[in-house]
Image: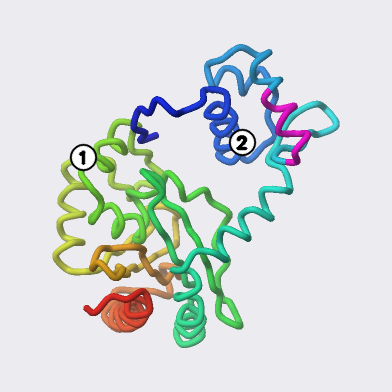
Amino acid sequence: MLQKASPYIVASVDRALELLLILGRYPHAMGVTELSKILGVQKSTVHSLLQTMLARGFVQQTDNGRYSLGMRLIHLGEICAERLDIRTAARPIMVELANETKEIVLLAVLARDELVIVDKVEPQRPFLIIPKFDFSMAIHSTAVGKILLAHAPEEIYEAILLRGIERFTQFTLTDHESLRRELMKVREQGYAIGCNETIEGITCIAVPIYNAGGKVAAALSISSASSMLGVDRYEAIIEILKEKAKLISRRLGCTC
């Protein structure tokens, strides 16, 4: 992860938070030994941290003694989502977009060097169900990720290269130079396309949302089955996405 050294970081708290991130990254419940190896600390330390978080509801324990994320995080996540001004500003327009296009709409932001989907709206009669997927490490292969990465500081890009670019499908860009060229293209044209790059059979088109300072604050996208969102629909989808993104940007105070 991209982190700046700070004399105020408390090691035990940092490890506890990292444990939560690890549990969120893996789909299965995990044991102390497995978590200890990933985190690189003694099992006794991991056990103590888990027991502390278990007592507060941040993790839960299965019958066989393994751990997963706790229900209390759901409540905190809901509070956080409600307090995100960008989510509040975007939600009504996302609903309009989903109903007008009959496609799934996503709103994404960048949290350090990870992609975070902060909201999702499906049309009243969805024709597509996107498989459950951890998008946090797919910043290089999704349309929303490309938008955010194209406008991110160089240090973010370098951090992503350092941790490694994962290949999800045969179409995923994993070559550094190819990815740089793609991001340059995204900046120039003002939109990004991810076709079968993260999930086979899914195409996503995204555009940027700007804040009051004129900087890219989020990415707005439409996702559909690749068979339904062909090249012949790109121009129309990009046009309506830009229109809706402009409305959201104005709600955030952008005069662009």
The correct choice, above or below, for 86 with respect to 57 in the image is below
Magenta stretch contains residue 187: no
Tell which of 190 and 14 is nearer to you.
Answer: 14
Nearer the viewer's eye, disc 1 or disc 2? 2
Which residue is at 52% across, 22% downward?
Answer: 11
Residue with the mark numbered 1: 176
The way the protein has been coloured in the rendering is: rainbow
Identify the element where label 2 is drawn.
helix
* Residue at figure coordinates x 57%, y 23% from the top left: 12
- What amino acid is at disc 1? His
Q: Position of residue 142 (x, y in %)?
A: 37, 56
What stretch of residues is rendered in magenta? 49-57
The residue shown at (72%, 32%) is 67
Which residue is more in the foreground, 63 or 181? Answer: 63
> Quick one: quadrant of the N terminus?
top left
Q: Residues within 10 Å of mark 2 (few under 14, many from 20)?
A: some
Residue 146, horizontal then vertical, whole percent:
30, 56
Residue 179, image x and y in percent? 22, 47
Q: Main secondary structure of the magenta part?
A: helix
Tag of residue 23: 2
Rendered image: mark on residue 126:
none
In the rendered image, is residue 205 in sight? yes
Q: Is residue 52 magenta?
A: yes
Q: Are marks 1 and 2 in contact (CB under 8 Å)?
A: no
- The answer to whether residue 233 of the structure is visible from this angle is no
Q: Which is more N-terminal, label 2 or label 1? A: 2
| Image quarter hosting the C terminus | bottom left
Q: Position of residue 188 (x, y in %)?
A: 14, 65
Taking depth in this image into account, of 200 and 154 the one nearest to the observer is: 154
Q: Amino acid at mark 2?
A: Leu
